[in-house]
């Protein structure tokens, strides 16, 4: 099996170093540690529906998502995680795709598998990974679609990209925005482009349910666009029944769990501040600001893989070596923001290894 270079490789690491997976604290995977209330009850309801096929049109699921993000359900394409939507989209866009790097590797992989021409633009890592609008506008004729992750993975910083949207609309290109981590952002409504989807057909937004709701194994994501040609093309290629009855059933409840949503947002607002403040005390780290549930760090005197192995062998902590992101080198790591107790533990271990 090919290593695709993501986090959450707990099983491989545990087997390699003869450890029990239950003992590993996984900071390489960016998942909300909070658990949805009554989750077991919803799972059992989903189990009871396993003897029947899910609704092939996912009518109720799309309605539930539509109510959650306040948009026409007809503009929503559910999938087996956001990754399925990414790969389906790649089959239905024009040949020249620009990608803003460093970012999630599956955009490039999906594009290559569909023989798309890739044009790489670089975010400015010396300026909090800012977007060079002049460069994009100056090269506007070199691409048909532009892919941006907002907030971006691996650095977690959200951007107001309305000026970028104006450039795309003016030149009749397609803007693809991965908003997988948008729900972790404080006042997300100021940054999400969902509010422009019905007005402009030049937008395709990708979202994931299972990051914010802490269930990545459930595999539920969706695309949002008012571009009928894209919608029809995706459904032409989409396999039937890719969303299982568990995910379909959970959609009836989790989007209405206002207490879970509120408490999660409040938790991350406070815990982000705590983690950033504590990490910035370590002089051997350059810590990038974040608006999400993970933090990008550049090590000043140590290689990422070296620190990763030290933490894993000595403390059962797994972090993400971020050196394989385009534009980053062997000194970059990424860590998730987990429960306060787990965060205290990694801070203690980092101080032990890197403190002065």
Image (cartoon, rainbow, N blue to C red):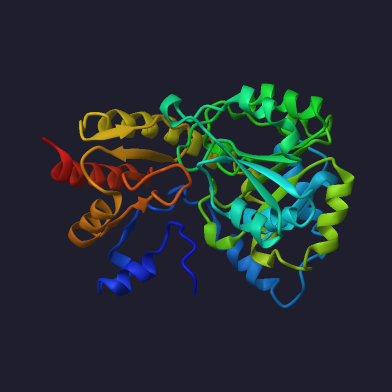
Give the residue displayed 79% in from the left and 58% down from the top.
58
Farthest residue to the bottom: give it. 51
Q: What is the x, y in percent for residue 293?
A: 45, 40
Query: Which one is in front, 90 or 19?
Result: 90
Q: What is the x, y in percent for residue 112?
A: 65, 58
Q: Is residue 245 above or below residue 221?
A: below
Q: Is residue 202 above or below residue 128?
A: below
Asked where in the image residue 310 lies, by quadrant, the reply is bottom left
Asked where in the image residue 243 lies, by quadrant, the reply is bottom right
Q: Quadrant of the C terminus?
A: top left
Give the residue displayed 76% in from the left and 43% down from the top.
66
Q: Is residue 67 left or right of residue 149?
A: right
Query: Which one is in front, 53 or 252?
Result: 53
Q: For the image shown, how many numbered marks are present on the structure? A: 0
Query: Which one is in front, 228 or 315?
Result: 228
Give the residue displayed 43% in from the left and 56% down from the top.
7
Q: Is residue 50 above or below residue 147?
A: below
Q: Is residue 230 left or right of residue 70?
A: right
Q: Is residue 257 visible?
A: yes
């Amino acid at each position: 099996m090919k290593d695709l270079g993501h986090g959450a490789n707990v099983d491989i690491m545990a087997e390699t170093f003869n450890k029990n997976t239950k003992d590993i604290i996984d900071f390489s995977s960016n998942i909300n540690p909070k658990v949805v209330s009554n989750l077991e009850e919803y799972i059992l309801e989903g189990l009871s529906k396993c003897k029947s096929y899910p609704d092939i049109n996912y009518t109720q699921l799309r309605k539930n998502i539509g109510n959650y993000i306040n948009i026409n359900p007809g503009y929503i394409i559910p999938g087996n995680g956001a990754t399925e939507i990414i790969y389906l989209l790649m089959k239905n866009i024009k040949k020249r795709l620009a990608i803003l790097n460093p970012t999630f590797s599956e955009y490039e992989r999906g594009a290559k598998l569909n023989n798309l021409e890739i044009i790489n633009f670089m975010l400015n890592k010396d300026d909090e990974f800012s977007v060079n609008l002049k460069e994009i506008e100056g090269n506007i004729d070199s691409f048909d679609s532009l892919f941006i992750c907002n907030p971006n993975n691996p650095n977690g910083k959200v951007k107001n990209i309305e000026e970028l949207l104006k450039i795309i609309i003016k030149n009749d290109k397609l803007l693809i925005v991965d908003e997988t981590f948008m729900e972790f952002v404080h006042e997300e409504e100021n940054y999400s482009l969902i509010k422009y989807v019905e007005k402009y057909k030049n937008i395709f937004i990708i979202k994931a349910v299972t990051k914010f709701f802490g269930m990545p194994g459930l595999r539920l994501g969706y695309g949002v666009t008012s571009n009928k040609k894209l919608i029809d093309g995706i459904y032409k290629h989409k396999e039937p029944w890719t969303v299982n009855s568990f995910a379909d059933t959970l959609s009836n409840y989790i989007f209405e769990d206002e207490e879970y949503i509120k408490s999660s947002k409040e938790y991350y607002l406070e815990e982000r501040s705590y983690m950033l403040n504590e990490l910035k005390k370590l002089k051997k780290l350059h810590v990038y600001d974040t608006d999400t549930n993970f933090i990008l760090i550049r090590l000043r005197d140590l290689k990422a893989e070296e620190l990763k192995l030290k933490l894993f062998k000595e403390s059962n902590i797994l972090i993400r070596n971020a050196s394989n992101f385009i534009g980053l080198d062997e000194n970059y790591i990424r860590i998730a923001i987990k429960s306060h107790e787990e965060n205290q533990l990694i801070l203690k271990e980092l101080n032990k290894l890197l403190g002065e």
